[in-house]
Image (cartoon, rainbow, N blue to C red):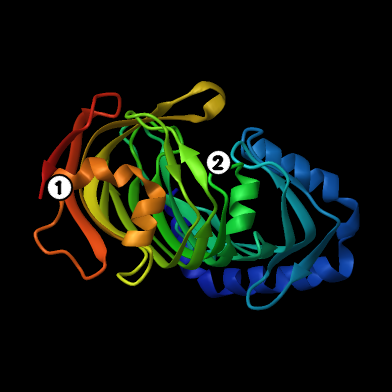
Amino acid sequence: MEQLRSFISKYKASLLLFFLALPVFLVLLFPLSDIGDLVSAKVAEFTDNKVFLQFDEMSITLLPRPGVAFENVQLYTPFVQGLKVDRLTAAPSLTGLLTFKPGISFYAQGVLGGEIGGSTRGGETTQQGTLRQKIDLNLNNVDLRAIVKAFDLSIPAVGSVSATVNLDVDPSFVEPPTGSAKITGSEITANAVQIPTQMGPISLPNLKVSSLEIQVDLKKGEAIAKTLRVGTPTDPLHVSADGKIEVRTSPGPGGQPNIELGGYDFSVRLDASKEFESQIGFLGFLDSYKAPTQPPGRSAYAVRISAPSIQSPARMNSL
C-alpha cells in the first residue's frame, strides 16, 4: 500500500494527464451506444439493486470535466419511481481517487421542473469498519408540484423550492447521519387538506404564503431545527419555530433504513389574519396561549410543545 501511495505521489501529474486524455480516446474509439444495458446493470449492482437507471443515449463529456452524459433518463429508487431527467452528467472525483476514497459528482437538468447537482465521496470509517459517505446536494428552483407528484405526498402544493444539503452518512445505518440542510421556497400555495393528528383530524383551508425557510442540523441522534419559518407577518398565516426531535436509525430489511422519531421539544410562534382564523376554525383551543402583544387585525400565539416520544400525548405550555 505504501508503495502504491508513493507511486501516485511521484506520478500525480502524469496520472492527471491520463485521466484527462482518456475520455478523448473513448469518444473516438469506444462504441458507447452498445453498452447502455451494461451501465444500467452495473448501477443496479453497485447500489445493491436499490437504484435502476434507464436512458436513451450515452456520451462522453470533456467540459467542465471529463465524465459521462445520459439523455432522457428514468430513475427508479426505493423513494421515487420513474423520476424523469432530461440530461444527467456524472464524473469521477479525482480527489477521491487520489485519496483512495472514490466518489462522483453529478448534475441533472430538467428534473422536477428544476436542476439538481451534487457529489458523494468516502469519509471516515465507522466503528464497525464501514466507510461513511459525504453527500452534498443542491436543488435549484425545483417545482413543488412535481415533488408532491413524484413522492406521492398527501399535501397538494405549488411553488418553487431550493435546497442545500450536506450529510455524512453511514450506508449501513448503524450510526446516525450528521450534517445540515437548508430549504427555501417562494410563492407557495397549498390546497385545502385534512391532516390527522393526535387530537383528531385538522382541516386546513387554501393557504398562500410568500416564503418558506427551514434550517436543520443533524447531530448526535437529533434533528435540531434552527429555523422553521412559514410566511411573513403580512401573509394570512405566519409561523416561526425552533426546537429538536430525536432521530434514530437502524438497518432495515433489504438494506433500507429504519427511521424512528423520539422525543421532541419545540417553541412555536404563529399569528394569523382574522379572515384566515375564521376559516381554519381550530385555533380557538390556543386561546390560553395567546401572545401578550397582538398585532393589529391578527391573532398571535406563543406555545411550547413537547413530549418524551412521538407516541406520547403532547405537553403544551405558554412561552
Q: Is residue 181 left or right of residue 145?
A: left
Picture quadrant where residue 28 is located: bottom right
- Residue 33: mark in rendering: none
Residue 181, can we see it?
Answer: no
Is 38 in front, or is 84? Answer: 84
Residue 242, position as x, y percentages in the image:
23, 53
For the residue labelled by badge 1, is the local secondary structure a helix, a strand or a loop? helix
- Residue 154: mark in rendering: 2
Residue 312, position as x, y percentages in the image:
24, 24
Is 316 in front, or is 124? Answer: 316
Q: Which residue is mark 1?
A: 289
Q: Across the whole image, how many numbered discs are drawn on residues?
A: 2
Mark 2 or mark 1, which is nearer to you?
1
Given the image, on which type of amino acid does mark 2 rest?
Ser
Image point 38% across, 34% down: which residue?
A: 129
Residue 15, can we see it?
Answer: yes
Q: Is residue 254 left or right of residue 295?
A: right
Picture quadrant where residue 66 is located: bottom right
Q: Residues within 10 Å of mark 2 (few under 14, many from 20)?
A: few
Q: Is residue 305 left or right of residue 36?
A: left
Q: Quick one: label 2 or label 1, which is nearer the N terminus?
A: 2
Given the image, on which type of amino acid does mark 1 rest?
Tyr
Residue 91, position as x, y percentages in the image:
63, 63
